[in-house]
Image (cartoon, grey):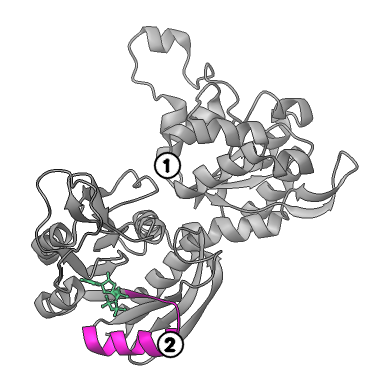
Amino acid sequence: MKVILGVCGGIAAYKAAELLRELQRRGATVQVVMTANAERFVTPLTFAALSGSQVMTSLWQTTHSEASIADGEDFDIEHIQITQNADVLVVAPATANMLAKMAHGFADDFLSATVLAATIPIIVAPAMNLHMWEHPATQANLKTLQQRGVQIVSPESGELACGMVGAGRLAEPGAIADRVFATSGRTKDLVGETILITAGGTRELIDPVRFIGNRSSGKMGVALAHAALERGARVILVGASLAVPTPPGCESIRVTTAEEMESIVLGRLTEASMVIMAAAVSDYRVACPAPEKLKKKNSLTLELLPTRDILRQVVEQRHAGTIVIGFAAETENVLEEGRRKLRAKGADLIVANDVSYADSGFEADVNEGILISQDVELPLPRGSKREMADRILDWTRLRQSRT
Ligand code: CTP
């Protein structure tokens, strides 16, 4: 396995040397990239000696001579080429400045340009002063990165270099290495699979400007798409209303209504080896949406008609062997409702989650729930939607290994 280790300028830069050794002990080859500020804390020579390869520090650095380039010899653009041969990119320590650059797409040095060019999984392990860590700008940047699929190894609490006590200390090298190997170890276990994922909340039009919708943000479906792509699957993402961007690398199809989602999902079903229905699909549609904006009156009565159940149709029309997973977002009797939906819809797995908590479920970045299949009921402890996505995909591997 090949890891790119990006080192930023902070007092914790010396710990990157320990991380490098830990990654090597576990069998990884490591290519180090340093920022100019990192070089003030640790010399590139240290990392070159430990890694056994040239440390990349500048966009103007090349392993080719000017003469050979002038002679027309083929040469690689280093910050693009190095990610093509690597499995994971880990930035440790990641400073507040680097997180800001990553969140906003800056590419003004070798490391930020490498991050921008990377299509491999990215992990960041931040380390900084407590106030910088807690600053809304840093937290917003982290959130943006997380929504794009970047994994965060959160800093630990303790005594910081500045003398303060609190969160901001680089996570232990062992914990960062665990995440690197957990990510890369399953990077390619879904190669050959085509996964059709629905995400977000459908909207049923009342008139050209109003709709009936729901609180789904699409974060769970998008997290599933990120995880599936990183593990090598081809992903078709059918997204209704989404509060987060769709990942690069998937085929993204946008829909508005339940009927549009039904038509796309059933139309693409033959291509899919797995279908994951994470979308919150409206159970009703407006019988006759008004062609023009409705004017205010004393009262308004809308006739609502039931929509067709897409999940049930997917189960009926699938090829033998296509795994079908549904979601059940509940506010009470989560387990019973999940079991009922498993039977009623005929899915292979229902991911039941409690959406009555304010800080998890709808719109939140964390979730918790229960995986319910015919032979196993597996609690999913509270964690990021990305972690939950990986647990769901792990279940599909387990199921395929049994059949
Ligand atoms: N679903 C679907 N088509 C619908 C409604 C729901 O495919 N018209 C799917 C959802 O994507 C989800 C699962 O069915 O994977 C369960 O959705 P949920 O809204 O929890 O269940 P409903 O069947 O709508 O039942 P109820 O509203 O009574 O809870």
* Residue 303 x %, y %: 15, 67
In the figure, is residue 46 to the left or right of 82? right
Q: Is residue 272 visible?
A: no
Q: Is residue 317 above or below residue 183?
A: below
Closer to us: 244 or 379: 244
Circle on res. 85: 1
Q: Amino acid at mark 2?
A: Leu
Q: Amino acid at mark 1?
A: Asn
Disc 2 crowd rating (10 Å Cα; few below 14, some 14-19, many 20+) is many
Q: Are marks 2 and 1 in contact (CB under 8 Å)?
A: no
* Residue 369 x %, y %: 47, 77
* Residue 14 x %, y %: 77, 40
Q: Earlier in the sequence, mark 2 or mark 1?
A: 1
The magenta span reads 327-345
Circle on res. 335: 2
Q: Can residue 336 be found in the magenta stretch?
A: yes
